[in-house]
Amino acid sequence: MKPLVIGLGNDLMGDDAIGILAARSLKEQVATRADVVESALHGVALLDIFIGYRRAIIIDAIHTGTRPPGSILDIDPATLEATVSPSPHFSGLPELQTIARELGLDFPKDVRIVAVEVSGAFEIGRPISPAVAEALVPLVERVKRLLADWEKKPETEAS
């Protein structure tokens, strides 16, 4: 089964477009190796996209303030903490995994997150910053390497 690659973001909000732009770049490059999806959705609305896949790569913008904009981060989903949100619409990956488990849904066992540090300025109509735009090619290459690594490792070893 092909893995899922999902680029998250909003291409109308500057640096938040990086996940969408990476997905667009990857669609033709890895079409035979992965299902590539662009999404501006968040929270529980993302759950249906993940169902049925064994492996998934999430590409997104992140603002930690600890690295320069354009830095590429590999985030271990196990380090993410579930948070109490005022709304179920703002659920994160840990909450999605819990919901899927509780409902007996077939959620990916192996999830990787590749994120690009952004400045935090998500304004409608703002263009993507030069530092984040320069990260696009290395970001795409990083995702392609992850896919290549998975191809060497059978799915039964994925979890």
Image: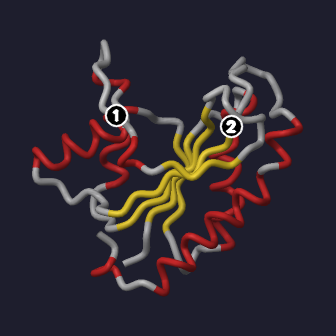
* Kind of residue at badge 2: Glu
Q: Residue at x 47, y 77 (%)?
A: 150
Placement of 61 over or under 114, stated as above or below: above
Q: Nearer the viewer, residue 34 or 118?
A: 118
Residue ID for mark 1: 81
Above or below, comparing residue 27 to residue 50 in the picture: below
Residue assigned mark 2: 117
Label 2, residues with CA under 10 Å away: few <14, some 14-19, many ≥20: many
Front-most of residues 70 and 127: 70
Residue 53: x and y in percent read 33, 65
Looking at the rendered structure, the secondary structure element under dot 1 is: loop
Q: Position of residue 100 (x, y in %)?
A: 20, 47
Q: Quadrant of the C terminus?
A: bottom left
Q: Is residue 80 above or below residue 158?
A: above
Q: Residue at x 73, y 33 (%)?
A: 15
- Residue type at mark 1? Glu
Q: Earlier in the sequence, mark 1 or mark 2?
A: 1
Mark 1 touches mark 2? (CB < 8 Å): no
| Circle 1 residues within 10 Å: few <14, some 14–19, many ≥20 | few
